[in-house]
């Protein structure tokens, strides 16, 4: 990670530590989406939009600009889910339901630019860390670490399809169906998958 990114994340973390209690109190510790009482542990500052250099601004300024609000963590999760590729926005819609086990995955989309260093392509899909590690261990996916211009990239890509086991081929075909339909997050899929295959660790 280059110094510029490190500084950005440091500013973000420090800003949230300074302001989380202040924003919660401003909104009377009540989720602004579902109206449930939400304490510091179960709530989050939600960015409705980014105005530029937000983590150098006071929370009062961001409130004035209608850029932030206070919501519970459940609402926060749903606000950041992208169910289709078209819904993805790197800043706002960056999470999704794993294409394998259908569990929720924070930042599951943009961290998985399969075969690419950055950005999405038409066959991108969300994947949780647990399934990612299992698929790498079973040689369905390959991982390469690259450092480009001082930034570390974790590049993940599919292995040669012809060399995969029958279960791996089946899994890839199931993922491909979701990619073709461009839809992720059907909770019925999770139940069906678990009934057929159990935990992802037992897939192979």
Image: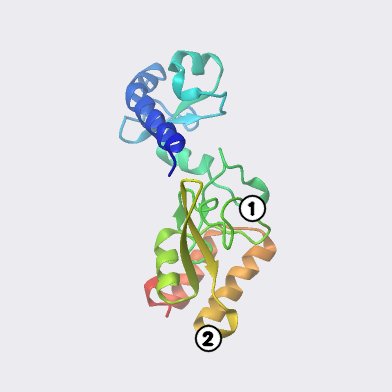
The residue beneath circle 2 is 166
Q: Earlier in the sequence, mark 1 or mark 2?
A: 1
Kindly indicate whether the residue at mark 2 contacts the one at mark 1 (C-beta within 8 angstroms): no
Residue beneath the point at 46% across and 46% down: 150
Whole-percent x and y of residue 103? 45, 58
22 left or right of 158?
left
Q: 155 or 27, which is in the foreground? A: 155
Read off the residue under disc 1.
Answer: 84
Decide: is 155 above or below 23.
below
Q: Quadrant of residue 94?
A: top right
Q: How many residues crowd around disc 2 within 10 Å: few (fewer than 14), some, or many (20 or more)?
A: few
The answer to whether residue 199 shows anywhere in this view is no
The residue sitting at the front extreme is: 149
Quadrant that contains the C terminus:
bottom left
- Tell me, yes or no, if residue 181 can be seen here: yes
Residue displayed at 57% across by 61% down: 114
> For the point 68% across and 49% down, which residue is it?
86
**Image: 126 above or below 191:** above
Screen quadrant of the N terminus: top left
Left or right: residue 40 versus residue 160 is left
């Amino acid at each position: 990670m280059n110094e510029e990114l490190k500084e950005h994340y440091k500013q973000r973390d420090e800003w949230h530590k300074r302001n989380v209690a202040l924003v919660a109190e401003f909104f009377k510790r009540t989720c602004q989406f579902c109206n449930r009482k939400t304490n510091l542990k179960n709530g989050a500052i939600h960015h409705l939009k980014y105005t530029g250099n937000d983590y150098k601004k006071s929370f009062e300024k961001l409130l004035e600009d209608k850029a932030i609000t206070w919501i519970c963590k459940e609402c926060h999760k749903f606000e950041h889910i992208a169910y289709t590729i078209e819904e993805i926005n790197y800043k706002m819609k960056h999470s999704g339901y794993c294409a394998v086990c259908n569990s929720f995955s924070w930042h599951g989309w943009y961290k998985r630019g399969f075969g690419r260093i950055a950005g999405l392509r038409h066959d991108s899909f969300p994947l949780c860390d647990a399934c990612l590690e299992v698929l790498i261990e079973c040689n369905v996916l390959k991982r390469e670490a690259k450092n480009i211009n001082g930034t570390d990239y974790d590049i993940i890509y599919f292995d040669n399809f012809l060399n995969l086991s029958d279960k791996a081929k089946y899994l890839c075909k199931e993922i491909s169906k979701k990619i073709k339909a461009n839809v992720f997050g059907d909770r019925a899929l999770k139940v069906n998958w678990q009934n057929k295959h159990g935990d992802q660790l037992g897939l192979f």
